[in-house]
Image: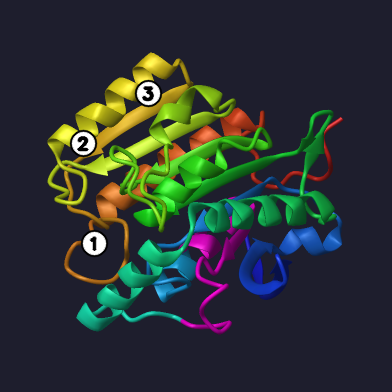
Amino acid sequence: MQITATNVELTIDGFPCRTYVAAPKAAQSGAQYPGIILYSEIFQLTGPICRTANRLAGHGFVVAAPEIYHRTCPPGLVIAYDDPGRMYGNHLAHSTPVGHFDATATAVFNHFDTRNDVKRDSAGALIGAIGFCIGGHLALRSALDPRCRAAVCAYPTGVHNGDLGADPDAGTLARLKDIQGELLLVFGDVDPHVPVSARHMIRSALQVSGVRHRYLELPGEHAFMRDEGTRYDPEMADRVFVEAIALYRRAFHLSNDPHPSGALS
C-alpha cells in the first residue's frame, strides 16, 4: 500500500508538538483506517522511527509519532545515536514529568478523534499504540486511556521499577489492571536495560492483573528492532511486526484485507 507522510503540529498546554503522520495514500479518497500512536526512543523522530511509521502505514494504519520532548526542545530536533546524544536524550527523559508524557497521548488520541481518515465503530475511533525503549513504556501508559484498544511495547524500560520521567515512581505496573485493551510486550533475552529479574517482575504483574496480553522474549539485545547499528536483527524485527499487525487486526476486528473502503457500521 502506498503512503503519504506529513508533519502535523498539535498544541499541548500551549506548547507546539510536531507530530509525524504517515497514512495510506488511499485515505485521500475517503477510505478510513485505524489510528496508531507511535512513541520513539529517547532520540525522538529519527530515521528508524519514521521508517517504522511508514511501514505500519503501509499495512493500513494512520500512524502519528509525536516529539516526546516538545515542551523543552525546538520542533524538529532529532538527537544523534551517539554517546553525547544518549546522554542528552536521557537527561530529557529524566527531567520530563510523567504527566507531560501522558498529556501527549491524550492530545494525539484527541487528534485521531477529529480525523476523517480514522476508522470508527459504535464505541468511537479505532486507536492503538506502539513504542520502543522509553516509548515502549509510554505506549503501555497510553493503554490506560480507554480509547486505546491495543498497545505494542517493544523492550519498554522502567516498567518494573517505575523509572520514567522526573517522577520518583511512575506507578505504571500497579495500574495494569486498569487497562481495557490488549497488550503485546516484547523483550530481547540479553537486554541489560531490562534484565531477567525485571522481566520476571513484569510478567508476573501482567498475569496477576488479568489484562489481556501476549508476552514474548526473543533472541536479541536492547533496540534489536532499530534498523541502524550493530544490534539490529531484521528477522526478529520482522517477527515483532507480524505479531503487532496481527494484534491490531484482531483488536480492531479487521479482516485480512489491508484495503478497507469505509467506516465500520
Residue 12 visible to an observer of this rendering = yes
**Residue at image x 27%, y 48%?**
236
Measured from the top left, where is residue 1 in percent x and y?
A: 62, 58
Tell me if 124 is positioned left or right of 195 in this view.
right
Residue 58 visible to an observer of this rendering = no
Mark 3 surroundings within 10 Å by alpha-carbon count, few (fewer than 14), some (14 through 19), many (20 or more): many
Which span is picked out in magenta?
52-77
Residue type of the residue flagged with mark 2: Ala
The alpha-carbon separation of the residues under discs 2 and 3 comes to: 12 Å
User: First in sequence: mark 1 or mark 2?
Assistant: 2
Tell me if 255 is positioned left or right of 97 in this view.
right
Mark 1 surroundings within 10 Å by alpha-carbon count, few (fewer than 14), some (14 through 19), many (20 or more): some
Q: Check whether the beta carbons of the residues at disc 2 and disc 3 lie within 8 A of each other.
A: no
Task: Read off the residue under disc 3.
Answer: 206
Task: Read off the residue under disc 2.
Answer: 198
User: First in sequence: mark 1 or mark 3?
Assistant: 3
* Mark toward the viewer: 1 or 2: 2
Residue type of the residue flagged with mark 1: Tyr
Mark 2 surroundings within 10 Å by alpha-carbon count, few (fewer than 14), some (14 through 19), many (20 or more): some
Helix or strand or loop: what does disc 3 sit on?
helix
Measured from the top left, where is residue 183 in percent x and y?
A: 47, 32
Task: Read off the residue under disc 1.
Answer: 232
Helix or strand or loop: what does disc 2 sit on?
helix
Compared with 239, 114 (above or below) is below
**Can residue 108 be found in the magenta stretch?**
no
Tell me if 80 is positioned left or right of 57 in this view.
left
